[in-house]
Amino acid sequence: MNSALSPTKRERRKEARPGELLDAALALFVEKGFAATRVEEVAARAGVSKGTLFLYFPSKEELFKAVVRETIAGRFGEWNDELDAFQGDSAELLRYTMNAWWERIGMTAASGITKLVMSEAGTFPEIASFYQHEVIDPGRALLKRVLQRGIDRGDFRPMDLDSAVYSLIAPMIFLLMWKHSMAPCCPPADRLDPQAFLGTQVGLLLDGMRVRP
Amino acid sequence: MNSALSPTKRERRKEARPGELLDAALALFVEKGFAATRVEEVAARAGVSKGTLFLYFPSKEELFKAVVRETIAGRFGEWNDELDAFQGDSAELLRYTMNAWWERIGMTAASGITKLVMSEAGTFPEIASFYQHEVIDPGRALLKRVLQRGIDRGDFRPMDLDSAVYSLIAPMIFLLMWKHSMAPCCPPADRLDPQAFLGTQVGLLLDGMRVRP
Amino acid sequence: MNSALSPTKRERRKEARPGELLDAALALFVEKGFAATRVEEVAARAGVSKGTLFLYFPSKEELFKAVVRETIAGRFGEWNDELDAFQGDSAELLRYTMNAWWERIGMTAASGITKLVMSEAGTFPEIASFYQHEVIDPGRALLKRVLQRGIDRGDFRPMDLDSAVYSLIAPMIFLLMWKHSMAPCCPPADRLDPQAFLGTQVGLLLDGMRVRP
Amino acid sequence: MNSALSPTKRERRKEARPGELLDAALALFVEKGFAATRVEEVAARAGVSKGTLFLYFPSKEELFKAVVRETIAGRFGEWNDELDAFQGDSAELLRYTMNAWWERIGMTAASGITKLVMSEAGTFPEIASFYQHEVIDPGRALLKRVLQRGIDRGDFRPMDLDSAVYSLIAPMIFLLMWKHSMAPCCPPADRLDPQAFLGTQVGLLLDGMRVRP
DNA sequence: TATGAATGAGAGTTCATTCAT
DNA sequence: GATGAATGAACTCTCATTCAT
């Protein structure tokens, strides 16, 4: 057997199974919500039979939890490194960070997960809690470091950091909820342009809207 | 018939029924989501039998729509009047408006409905569209007027209004999604204080976080 | 009170109630069948409320039975008298009898009852049996007398009377089932003309289709 | 997979399922009518669970339609061939045809379907229409050919074919309605003997009941 | 390991029947 | 008597889950 060296096609597929199922489930859960997604659809989209799905995941709920866990594998390590390496004005860093978030999370399927977790938090508090610890808290910590850096460098004025962090999270959460709920039903003309919005929002947070005295 | 003068107990109940059912449905939909709420539960909570519910609402979906309609019934009229009557600085007006939103929507069950609509938008695009027209659009228009007033009076500097409006909506949507999803699972210490957050957010939007040159 | 002499409108209506309900029920049962007819519809058509119907008939089943009983009140007395009074050829009498049946039963709502009884006989064997005794048997006896008269007068050749009677009933039953089932769905062009059919049928029964030797 | 060679027990069952369900449905629909038959009963009689039935038929109504289609699947081909091959007197052919009808339709479960279709025509006009096109019309065409053959050969006198055809259909429809409605409730003594009746009826139609001039 | 036929608890909905007014 | 709001049993249909093959 050559499995140790180069897996056969069947073996490769076998190993890929859970991943394919998770991808299919992610797409469908995001599109239709947990309750409205049928496991048979997930299986079909992953190219396997209904029974096979239950070989890998003991129940629909566990499949959901696995989807969430899988999709949010630690993304903050490299991000923190980028922050440390950044040279220059903190306003620039902030803009860069928000943009990076949009490109790496907001624009990708990962944004669907957040929407999903928030939508189904009532039904899966455990998942919401897990998400809080694994994603939200690290994210807040990262943003806090950016702000702290700004204050330390004299770029930003002193402020209540915890609260300000939420001011940065808010537009991101809003953007992704919007994208996955209201946007699909709005006439294109009215549609919110995410990057432009993010730019304006950061701009306002940096400089404010009030006329200077 | 005495119905013209004083309604009998039965008649009084009959008039109250739809409201009682709507209340029960609102509570349960917000708590468990649309799919996970059983009509029998709604009926039971309203103190009637399953069949009675269908006397007033032809289907579960129509019940849901009715809940949405009921909860958001024209709230913008008085709000616009207050805006017109307001004397003073536009920054004050903005703070006042955001506070009022929290007190009238964010703190009440109406916030649950918005969370629900956004969560179930994939399953009920029609509802999402309805919500967009009946709630979101009027809300945006109102905020736009506030900003325009500020610019006209020289309180605010000129800006892209449409985009800035979303910067005001974002914290509200965020707050209410948070309240109905993550908040219930987070340790109290970490909990976001909505009023404080809103204050900080508006403060930042008004004056920015950057050190003045 | 004048009720003994001339009843008031309300009293007249009260006495008429069961009749109005029976009429409404007859029409709806014939149109939609027993199961598909809702008692509320019957009540509405009779201009009363659902509850009132149950004041006069203890159940939907009893209503159905009453409809059948009511609609077939002895019609054979006068018919037998006509037969006795008839002068002339028995072939003429037979034609007359069949025509009279069509005009008095086939064309009227009474035909719907027969269709109904036959259709629902499986569910209401008791009703079928009642119908057999009250309608079918007297009808057969009457037709038998017509045939016997023909034989006695030398108009008809001897034959098995019981069986021949069914040959006369068959086209009537057929016609009324047809009218209440297939006819409504057939293109007008194909539609069976009842009187013409009855004429042909009696003609054939009288003279046959075989070429005479 | 061995399915190509010898189907497994499960596979054999799977193939048999629709047929078993159809048989069970036929029996129950005929016995109790469409509305009074519960799908669970049908499933139980076929030895499967409620859910299984819906694996094969998407709804109760479709099950009913399938029963109708199945029971009447092209029966007229061979019948027309027999007619073409028939040698001899047209009166004989007519007797043979009517007898064959009784043996192949009247005596079998197929008669129950016709009764059912006529009984439920009000509720399922679509089915009635389908039946008209698939069964009644071909039947009429066949009988018409028999009569035409008789006239062409000089066995029968000229006549209005369309109308005469109904004179042949009438006793068949009558017989089958009778069998499925009144017959079960009548005392055996009174019972109509179908074959005898059909014989008499055809005899009368061939030769008439009038004494020859 | 993979399948998909089979299951059956459970949900929404209907409607004959009851009964307080 | 008359009403119609209320009931709840009954019914169709769904779908996560199981298991023989």
Image (cartoon, coloured by chain):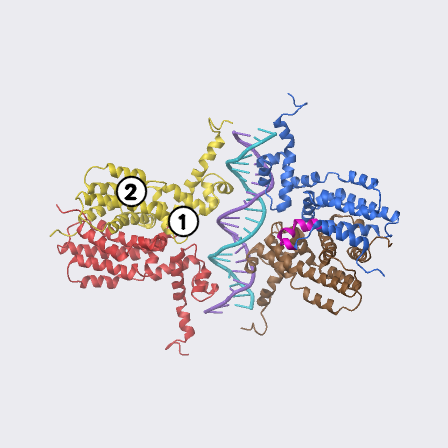
Chain colours: A red, B yellow, C blue, D brown, E purple, F cyan
Q: Residue furthest bottom?
A: A1
Report which quarter residue B151 is drawn in: top left
Secondary structure at numbered mark 2: helix
Q: Residue furthest left?
A: B213
Which of the two discs, 2 and 1, labels the residue nearer the N terminus?
1
Residue that appears at 84% across and 46% down = C89
Chain where mark 2 sits: B
Chain where mark 1 sits: B
Residue that appears at 29% across and 42% down = B101
Figure quadrant of the N terminus of chain A: bottom left
Magenta residues (range): C175-189
Query: Measured from the top left, where is residue B111 in percent x and y?
Result: 34, 45
Figure quadrant of the C terminus of chain A: top left
Secondary structure at numbered mark 1: loop
Query: Measured from the top left, where is residue D195 in percent x and y?
Result: 78, 57
In this picture, residue C115 sits left or right of residue C82: left
Report which quarter residue C70 is drawn in: top right
What residue would you read off at disc 2? B101
Name the residue type under label 1: Gly
Out of D176 and A63, give the one closest to the viewer. Answer: D176
Dominant SS in magenta: helix
* Badge number at residue B33: 1
In this picture, residue E6 sits left or right of residue B160: right
Out of C132 and A22, give the one closest to the viewer. Answer: C132
Query: Measured from the top left, where is residue D209 in percent x and y?
Result: 83, 53
Name the residue type under label 2: Trp
Asked if badge 2 and badge 1 are on a common chain, one would say yes
* Vertical order, D92 against C148 (above or below): below
- What number of labels is visible? 2
Q: Is residue C183 magenta?
A: yes
Mark 2 and mark 1 residues within 8 Å of each other at the beta carbon: no
